[in-house]
Amino acid sequence: MSELDQAVRAVVRDCLGVREGEDVLVVCNPATQGLGERLRAEAEAVGAEGVLSVMAERASHAAEPPAPIAVAMVASDVVLAPTVQSLSHTAARKAATEAGVRAATLPGVTEEMLARMMSADMEGLRRKGRAIAELLTAGSQARITCRNGSDLRIGLEGRTGIPDAGELTEPGAFGNLPCGEGFIAPVEGTTEGRLVVDGTIATVGLGEPVELVVQRGHLVSASGERGERLMELLTAAGPDGTNVAELGIGTNEKAILSGEILEDEKLLGTAHVAFGASAAIGGTVQVPIHLDCLVTKPDVTVDGELVVRNGVLVV
């Protein structure tokens, strides 16, 4: 069995716990149809009813799928979404999981990436993801600093941290695959300061560091060409497009810096801050955009307790 076959098997049988007689919907784009068919076939091999639904690519991450697919998502037992643009932060995905559907999104995934990252130490990922989620849940404020000049303070009071560690067997479970982070939706209006992004910006890619300035929970300026493009994408979604939507910390030792945010945000010891939609992960903002921005060697504290030191996870 190839590494890819092993990864597909792990996704369907271990992470989602697909069972005989269940309805499994696989949503993909033409560019990801090959992997979508592999996932559908593996679901059928378990004895489930596997359905493949191919849709056109969306304009951005968090843009909604077509209405027939949204309806089918709610009617399924399990949804797998190896799409180019992420369905994680859509109202359709949130409605499905609220209805008890187990869902995994795989935005931007490649076969090579899936095979490599799913070979990580899954027990280690789960331990680290839970530890980060517990700290974020218990905390009232996180702080990100780095040698490039970041100093960002993020309010967490009352919000619940979420481990992304491939444990998706319970009704209503949701996560990314390949997995490897702990994350939270910050309290709207609380984030203040500066973040220097030296890693990937979702849909924008890699390049020179970008200085982001955040005031009262919204991104107000971003430097350079990458920053200009980021602001264009976010503001096109309206005033809430610049909302600080997520703080995440990567835990996957098999991830490498690739320019694809699905992988890069999982890099062990990195931190990412996202802007746009947060409703699907515990916030209150629903807009058709969600873009993550990566800091590769941060210091991260929660209420003064060190979580990451210069890109090294210490929990």
Image (cartoon, rainbow, N blue to C red):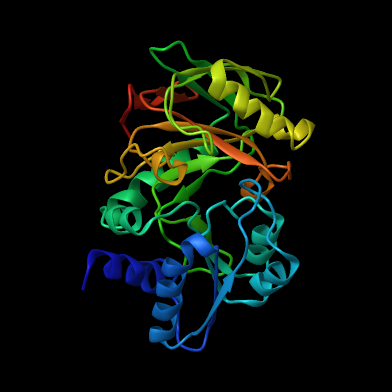
Front in this rendered view, residue 180 or 90: 90
Q: Is residue 314 visible?
A: yes
Q: How many marks?
A: 0
Front in this rendered view, residue 38 or 196: 38
Report the residue at 33% width, 50% height from top. Answer: 125
Report the residue at 43% width, 61% height from top. Answer: 167
**Position above or below: 111 against 249:** below
Instruction: Give the quadrant of residue 74.
Output: bottom right
Q: State the image coordinates of residue 297 (x, y, percent, origin top left).
A: 35, 24
Q: Is residue 32 left or right of residue 155?
A: left
Q: State the image coordinates of residue 227 (x, y, percent, origin top left).
A: 58, 22
**Position above or below: 177 against 2:** above
Residue farthest right in this picture: 239
Instruction: Give the quadrant of residue 234.
Output: top right
Residue farthest left in this picture: 1
Quadrant (top left, top right, bottom left, bottom right) of the N terminus: bottom left
Report the residue at 58% width, 37% height from top. Answer: 291
Q: State the image coordinates of residue 270 (x, y, percent, origin top left).
A: 38, 32
Q: Is residue 17 visible?
A: no
Front in this rendered view, residue 224 or 147: 224
Report the residue at 31% width, 56% height from top. Answer: 112
**Position above or below: 21 against 164:** below
Quadrant (top left, top right, bottom left, bottom right) of the C terminus: top left
Front in this rendered view, residue 134 or 92: 92
Instruction: Give the quadrant of residue 51.
Output: bottom right
Q: Is residue 18 left or right of residue 218?
A: left
Q: Is residue 202 left or right of residue 130?
A: right
Q: State the image coordinates of residue 313 (x, y, percent, origin top left).
A: 32, 32
**Position above or below: 219 against 5:** above
